[in-house]
Image (tube, rainbow, N blue to C red):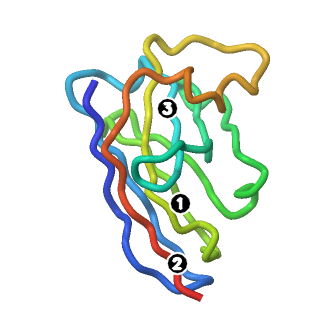
Amino acid sequence: VQLQASGGGLVQAGDSLRLSCVASGGDISNHNMAWFRGDPGKSRTFVAAIQRSAQNTHYADSVKGRFSISRDDAKNTVYLQINSAQPEDTAAYYCAADRAGRTYSPPWRYSLYSTYNYWGQGTLVTVSS
């Protein structure tokens, strides 16, 4: 599965933007999907995840209430809606897919970098104050 993220850019604090991640070479309906963020070339931290068939979503505490993850399996695309952007949201955002769409227990496993096998190249979001 190849993942291509887009939608990043320069915004002001309080603005909204939507990131997209289009998959090719595979059907995302078979995968749990997630977004991570971090400085390019450095470690990535969990942002949000959405299970197969959008059964459940999971969010990092730092983004709850401001970010929303969704998926459109017909378009093979997963989205991250960022509302009320803050300077601390500045990062490269990476989409990811796991290998086989398992149901993980306990739920915190959806936030682990090691859960995901396929990664996009990242799209840069810069939030000015």
Amino acid at the residue labelled 1: Gln
Q: Are marks 2 and 1 in contact (CB under 8 Å)?
A: no
Quarter in which the C terminus is drawn: bottom right
- In terms of depth relative to the viewer, which is nearer, 121 or 58? 121
Q: CA distance from mark 2 to mark 1?
A: 14 Å
Residue 43 in the image: state x and y as whole percent. 53, 42
Apparent side of residue 15 relative to residue 55 in the rendered image (left or right): left
Nearer mark to the viewer, of 2 and 1: 2
- x then y, percent, for residue 41: 40, 47
> Up-down: is 8 above or below 34?
below
Q: Mark 3 is on which residue type?
A: Met
Q: Which residue is mark 2?
A: 127
Q: Earlier in the sequence, mark 2 or mark 1?
A: 1
Q: Which residue is mark 1?
A: 81
User: Label 3 vs label 1: CA separation?
Assistant: 14 Å
Q: Are marks 3 and 1 in contact (CB under 8 Å)?
A: no
